[in-house]
Image (cartoon, rainbow, N blue to C red):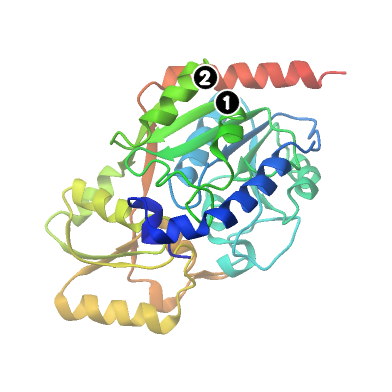
Amino acid sequence: MREPGFWHGPASLNSHLLQPLGALYGAVAAQRLRRKGLNAGIPVLCVGNYNVGGAGKTPTVLALAKLMRELGETPVVLSRGYGGELRGPVRVDPERHAAADVGDEPLMLAGYLPVVVSRKRADGVPLARSQGATVILMDDGFQNPSIVKDASLIVIDGERGLGNGKVFPAGPLRAPLRPQLARTDALIIVGGGTAAEPVAAEIAAQGKPALRAHLKPDNAQVAAFRGKRVLAFAGIGDPARFFNTLRASGIDVVRQQAFADHHPYSQSEIEGLITEARRDGLALVTTEKDLARLRRGDGLSEWAKQIVPFGVTLEFEDPARLRKFVADRLFKARERKEP
């Protein structure tokens, strides 16, 4: 899905006309947030968004997984598997599954740590625990009440913020902002800009941490692209952020091609990009998540092996504060769950 331009622009007729639908959608979403969920028996930390679209949630999951391992935990990711056909519960196997089976984000994450996909998230808890999980790390699902969360960390883009602040389909919000703020335990602001400042102020006023972070490219990859001209493509929530990250890293992006989020690339589309890159002497680069969509169970498709993924990691300005927050939440969760 491509985000409508009016979601992130000034007030428009489209947004105004869709507000009644947004009010209905928001009322249902707010009511759903109040439902009681399953106690997983082990700590559950959720990484979510207030709004649809990209904000840096996947790098946040990876950063938290790394931190938990440093704390001696065994995290297992639990995902709905958006875009995949398998209902699960199933553990994602990069050697056997494709993005069409389990979704692109779970497939990418499975290259780093165990991932369980389950269309009904609560049904995936026993499988996650059977994989030795001491902590369940929910990838998305903040608005889904089916599992009790011990901490909800919300990721917001520092430059785009919440757009026009209206509820879907009049705007990008998944539910009215007020009840979402009340259920937020920590805010993670990714990137520069001031668009997230009002939300950060609200969270800070509640005595909750608003943590700042930025995406850091891999130094070796940046060096490998030095002196090369690039054709970049991406089908993620915010392709422009990927293109801007490349340029900010000193990479000469000659041409860029944006696709809808989770776009299922066809062989002819990729071959067209390869032909264009060859013709103009350009290196072809995309995101790790996009490349996951080009994988099959037996590896990367032959026709896609010339594409280079550009990986990034999330770095926090105050990692000690994040570490303390996570450690405290895990400790309190285990206190509550003890018989």
Q: CA distance from mark 1 to mark 2?
A: 6 Å
Question: Is 33 left or right of 283, judged from the image as shown?
Answer: right
Q: Quadrant of residue 188?
A: top left
Asked which secondary structure carries label 2, the reply is loop
What is the three-letter code of the residue carrying label 2?
A: Lys
Residue appearing at x 29%, y 35% in the figure: 192
| Rendered position, 234 above or below 63 | below
Q: Are marks 1 and 2 in contact (CB under 8 Å)?
A: yes
Q: Is residue 36 visible?
A: yes
Residue appearing at x 63%, y 57% in the figure: 81
Q: Which mark is residue 185?
A: 1
Residue appearing at x 64%, y 43% in the figure: 143
Q: Nearer the viewer, residue 153 or 316?
A: 153
Outermost residue toward the left in this view: 227
| Rendered position, 20 above or below 256 | above
Q: Quadrant of residue 103?
A: bottom right
If the image is split into quadrants, where does the C terminus sit?
Answer: top right
Asked which secondary structure carries label 1, the reply is loop
Residue 85: x percent and y percent?
A: 67, 68
Residue appearing at x 51%, y 55% in the figure: 108
Q: Quadrant of residue 286?
A: bottom left
Residue 255: x percent and y percent?
A: 20, 67
Q: Which mark is residue 208?
A: 2
Mark 1 and mark 2 lie on one chain; the one further toward the N terminus is 1
Rate crowding at label 1 as few (under 14), some (14 to 19) or many (20 or more) other CA atoms within 10 Å. many
Outermost residue toward the right in this view: 339
Residue 270: x percent and y percent?
A: 37, 77
Q: Which mark is residue 227?
A: none
| Rendered position, 48 above or below 67 | below
What is the three-letter code of the residue carrying label 1?
A: Asp
| Rendered position, 263 above or below 330 | below
Q: Nearer the viewer, residue 218 or 60?
A: 60
